[in-house]
Image (spheres, rainbow, N blue to C red):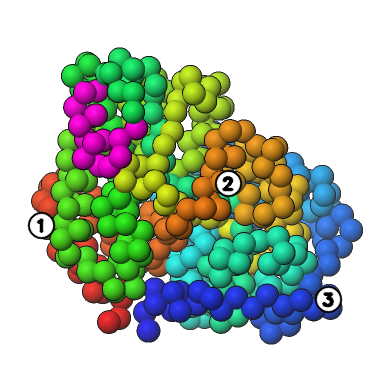
Amino acid sequence: MSVALAAVAALGLAACGSGNSSDSSGDASAGSTGAYTPKEGGAGGDVGVFTWWAEGSEKKGLDALVSEFEKQYPNDKFVNLAVAGGAGSNAKAKLASDLANGNPPGSFQGHAGAELTDYILADPPQIEPVNDVINALGGEKVFPKDLLDRLTVDGNIYSVPSNIHRANVVWANPKVLDKAGISETPKDIKGWIADMDKVKKSGVNTPLSIGGTWTQVQLFETVLMADLGAEKYAGLFDGSTKWDSEEVKTAVNDFKTLLTYTNKASDGDDWPDATNMVIDGKAAYNVMGDWAVAEFEAKGAKDGEDYVYFPVPGTDGVFDFLADSFTLPKGAPNPDGTKDWLMLVGSADGQKAFNLAKGSIPARTDVPADDFPKYQQSAMESFKSDTIASSIAHGAAAPLAWTDDISKATAKFYSTKDADGFLKDLTAAADKNVVK
Ligand code: GAL
């Protein structure tokens, strides 16, 4: 069975125990029913935490977590191991080599879903179950079951979610749209492309801003969702939708057309440059995860005046989902210190502080919505009522190797614009990664 299928098969297997014996060993069998009890003030010692939240608004999010950690676990010392680069574009390679060399951090950021299964199903496994921490935090009483399912393999939960982000959001500059005579949100990709022509005619050369490859993968996944619908999109990852189907061809061609309205991007271009183009009026639109809203707020931009937002046309009612979540690596230098960190990440106080600063919504369901600004309140509503679709660019849909193949195919397409070649590469990537 491929890793992807194993991940899919794992959905629905969450077995959140409800025992109350104390366990801090991080051992799978013992951890499945016990509940972790942290030492008052923390276990003591260093807790090295590996993320890619190294700069700007993302660092502010991490800082908010760290200051709560220092308050609640004063005996522990947080050590920041962040590696810059949005979506882990640099961090993931460094992490892979640290894990392979037996040099794991205290905890690392991973994406809920297929990406996490890479670490779980590695031989030997690279992360430990944390059922005892999840139990101590309240398990299914405080985390959505769907989300816990995405963190579970063979009945064990392997990480503590900090947040949920939405990736299919268009951020737009209302003044630029006004000048182009656009007053309505387009219903589908075709309508959106027509609006981009209006933007161009109004004198703005870059209707749609983009960054490096992962931002293009993210844009492409939203076009796939728009053109296939959520159900067929999900089928791309279990083999039930073919990558050489007519709908995927349409999506590839739409993506190709969208790229004719963008700035030129190099692979290393990070996302804030692309979102800034919208705020600065140099672009009308950018498709970015809702970490963008934190960047806008940090710059003093105002919701409704300086930026507006809507789901990528054709994806209304679909929530392109990703969640960050923190792990206990096998052989972590100070496992009890790591568990203090995980307890903080999963606590209501930690989630409120972090998500207010990060633009995401709490993974917990018991953090009051009223405490959050307008955008996040709307994301909370959508998460409750929309169809959930898994992000490719942010590890929810496919394991690392497959995502990597899709990224390479996208980078190649960006330079060749060869739609047939792109379809062939995408189909080959699926053939390699899904066992039929
Ligand atoms: C995602 C991550 C988000 C945000 C984004 C941009 O992969 O889950 O929390 O950091 O990358 O860097």
Q: Which residue is under mark 3?
A: 20
Helix, strand or loop status at disc 1:
helix
Q: CA distance from mark 3 to mark 1?
A: 57 Å
Q: CA distance from mark 3 to mark 2?
A: 31 Å
Helix, strand or loop status at disc 3:
loop
Q: Amino acid at mark 2?
A: Met
Q: Position of residue 142 (x, y in %)?
A: 70, 60
Of the pair 312 and 34, the residue shown nearer to us? 312
Q: Which mark is residue 343?
A: none
Quarter of the figure that contains the C terminus: bottom left
Of the pair 318 and 290, the residue shown nearer to us? 318
195 in the magenta segment: yes
State the extent of the magenta-drawn residues as a range. Answer: 185-199
Of the pair 315 and 56, the residue shown nearer to us? 315
Q: CA distance from mark 2 to mark 1?
A: 39 Å
Q: Position of residue 165 (x, y in %)?
A: 51, 48
Q: Earlier in the sequence, mark 2 or mark 1?
A: 2
Helix, strand or loop status at disc 2:
helix
Could you tell me which residue is drawn at 75 percent across and 47 percent down? Answer: 349
Callout 2: 10 Å neighbours few (<14), some, many (20+)? many
Q: Earlier in the sequence, mark 3 or mark 1?
A: 3
Quarter of the figure that contains the N terminus: bottom left
Q: Earlier in the sequence, mark 3 or mark 2?
A: 3
Q: Does residue 341 appear left or right of residue 53 in this picture?
A: right
Q: Which residue is under mark 1?
A: 420
Q: Which residue is under mark 2?
A: 380
Could you tell me which residue is drawn at 35 percent across and 42 percent down? Answer: 312
**Front position among marks 3 and 2:** 2
